[in-house]
Amino acid sequence: MTDTIIHLLAVIIVPPLLMGVIVKTKAAFAGRAGAPCFQLYYDLFKLMRKGTVFSETTTWVFRAGPVVTLAAVLVASLLVPLGRHAAPISFSGDLVFFVYLLGLARFFTAIAALDTGSSFEGMGAAREVTFSCFAEPALFFAFITLARLSNSLTLSRILTHVTPDVWLAAGASMLLLVGAIFIILLAENCRIPFDDPNTHLELTMIHEVMVLDHSGPAFAMILYGAAVKLFVLGALFVNIAFPFSTGNSILDWGIFIAAMLGLAVAIGVVESVMARIRIVRIPQLLVGATILSAFAMLLMLR
């Protein structure tokens, strides 16, 4: 029961902090002080106090987009174990349900953008769903490999099954999986080199262009949902890349939070040392992630 409460608190409180750490890391690389790590908390509270403006061309779909997206990623967060602790919700086949929850969030974000009637937002929605078609196979191949390792179809089981001993026995497969999932993490969260969340260049915008018409509490839900999605996929990566356990529940929670903050720093470093790649090259990189996951699976099945 205690682990479940800590799980819920971590999902609610920590995600905006990760965003702040990424921004702070990028500012340090640029030689600036940057915004405080808690800036997103301030922005969310400010947006929740503002009003919301809806275009006359929009329908209930536009209003439902942020709500359904946030609800989907929050439910997905209950399926992923944090560190060495089992997830609050667990059942056989929940890994498929997890992927489809992320797909549902993406779907409602895209149709909310299309509901505005703007060809500009439609362009962003088309790019978003196109690139997701390349990212999802890589994630499924990764889950198949982990399921084969653990002989289970439950996320809690397949992720907590990864231990240093598993790394020693199947190091090549695990290394390929880590590379593939890190690429998926950056792509699914619209980070550099796939997308730039701070861009204002109209021809290169992907995710940001889909939420231009949202304001007030609706925009706050979008920002918070994006932070939770980063946290969830980051937890997936940390469970595989840093499968360490001390046997002490509280200490393991501390190790997990420290690993998540380290991942945020790593993402900030990647965004500081790399430039955004051309849009036509994004499918090639995502196909590369799929190939990495597929080779990991073949190594496990040999």
Image (tube, rainbow, N blue to C red):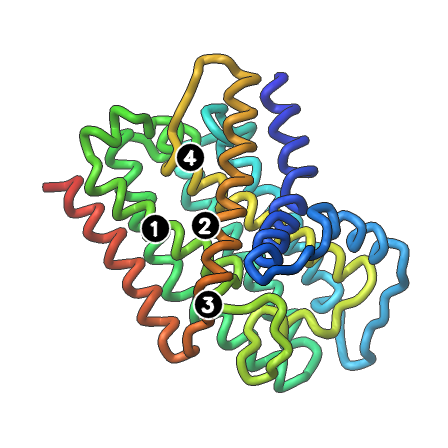
Depth-wise, is mark 3 or mark 2 nearer the camera? 3
Q: Amino acid at mark 3?
A: Phe
Q: Tag on residue 247?
A: none
Q: Alpha-carbon distance for marks 4 and 2?
A: 17 Å
| Of 92 and 54, the residue lying toward us | 54
Residue behind mark 3: 194
> Under tag 2, what secondary structure?
helix
Q: Alpha-carbon distance for marks 3 and 4?
A: 23 Å
> Under tag 1, what secondary structure?
helix
Q: Is residue 218 left or right of residue 231?
A: right
Image quarter in which the N terminus is found: top right
Q: Is residue 242 left or right of residue 253?
A: left
Q: Give residue 276's position: percent from left, percent from top.
A: 46, 71
Q: Amino acid at mark 4?
A: Asn
Residue behind mark 4: 239
Give the mark, 3 or 4, whose residue is nearer the N terminus.
Answer: 3
Q: Tag on residue 140?
A: 1
Depth-wise, is mark 1 or mark 4 nearer the camera? 4
- Confirm or deny contact between disc 1 and disc 2 (CB under 8 A): yes
